[in-house]
Image (cartoon, rainbow, N blue to C red):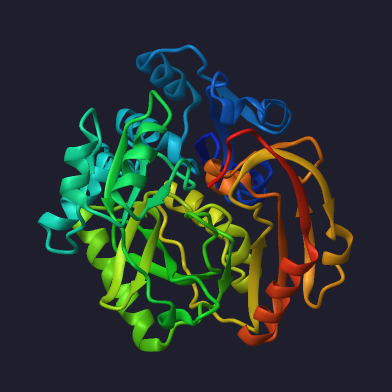
Amino acid sequence: MTGHARKVPRVAVVYDLGSATPNDILAAAHRLCEVVFVADFARPGTAGARQSMLALAEVVDVTGLDPEGRLRLLRGAAVDGIVTYSEYQLAETARLAHGLGLPYHAVEVIPALVDKLEQRRILAEAGVQATRCTVIGDDPARALDLVGVPAVIKPRIGAGSLHTTRVDTAEEFLATVAARPVGIEFVAEQMLVGDAGVAGEFWGDYVSVESVHTGTASRQVCVTGKFALAEPFRETGMLLPATLTEDAAAEVLALEAAAVRALGIRHGITHTEIKLTSDGPRIIEVNGRLGGYVPEILRRATGINLVRTALHVALGGEPRIPAARHRGVTYQYFLTPPALAGTLTSVDGVAELAGLPGVRNVETHAEPGRLVDWREGTQSHLGVVFGSAPDHDALRTVAESINATFRPVFAPSPGAGA
């Protein structure tokens, strides 16, 4: 007697620069689904992964196609789900999901997830949080009057702290606006002033919440702790568990849940950054996808694989997510350059990093001759140290040792600086 082979479900992954590599995605899909990559190879974040995608999986090449042409190819691929791990493909993925009748963020939710001004408007109107925010446009003086200082100037649409700058005076505000790149719309918003005492003096004054949303419920997976920011707003790493008290963590989770409801998020994964202030937690931004670097640290700390969970949710599933349990503290520490733009001329201390207590792996891309610009945000860092420590005090000691050991040397570009 012969049986019918069970059809393996297929998930389209709209690929671009983001929180998971082709190898990460394919490993996460093992015994769950087949992956079909959807790629526009004219995109700089996709072009570099072309060969690996073509060698490893089926690829739907949508380069140069109009929206209807892309949708037609996806219909032909007969996929059962769709997802992206890239901020830059949220809108496209929602459009394709709608055309295919597949679950994903609703098209009408996307502006609230990718447009920082729109998100601030919705959160204020819902009574979740009022934060002064405006488009700078051609009248920076008006924007300054509306927002005041200190303020944050950043692209209206973007990720990874790219071109994000703090300004503390009216003069800095106007100078930063005058020097901003052309072709990008910027917003100015009220700066949320952190309280270093909430997470502890050494640690970052912000955290993130990772959550999973399906048709039946929203599940908060964890609160991810952070190392202190490098000037002006560059992430330097993350840790699990965070250093928050139970009461502080509960406030953070309540705020995140309120923001998710206000924005109308019903499906997918969110990564919400929250500032820890003396007046309580405040939303920095809600992102409609996995956070960069989050899947690796969460999997290593708890065994929870959010890359796989995203595929499961894309198929309409209800993934079981266990409560996060920790043994010691798991971390990623970014090798962050100083706030300058210049050419890396030499690096000392890389070999010694691997010998520090609890260091599991050191990943570097600090080759002499590389041009480094702090304005590229998290894309400017020179590597990552992965490890674990018995407790937060031990981790602080290791982090201080990393800072003392890793010594990059730069030849600054003329006129470059913070």
The answer to which of 324 and 411 lies nearer the viewer is 411
Q: Is residue 161 above or below residue 38?
A: below
Q: With respect to residue 314, does 63 lie above or below?
A: above
Residue at horizontal 59 percent and vertical 61 percent from the top: 236
Q: Residue 400, relative to residue 233: is it above or below?
A: below
Quarter where residue 197 is shown: bottom left
| Residue 96 at x, y percent in the picture | 37, 29
Question: Looking at the picture, how far across and down is residue 94, in whole percent?
Answer: 34, 36
Asked whether residue 31 is in view, the answer is no
**Residue at x 29%, y 62% (from the top left corner):** 216
What residue is at 34 percent from the left and 87 percent from the top? 247
In the depicted structure, whether residue 242 falls above or below residue 131:
below
Position of residue 90 in the picture relative to residue 347 (left or right): left
Residue 30, x across and y down, in percent:
65, 50
Across the whole image, how many numbered discs are drawn on residues? 0
Q: Percent from the top left, x then y, of residue 341?
A: 62, 40
Taking depth in this image into account, of 191 and 57 the one nearest to the observer is: 191
Horizontal side, residue 105 vs residue 11: left or right: left
Q: Is residue 325 visible?
A: yes
Which quarter of the picture shows residue 188?
A: top left
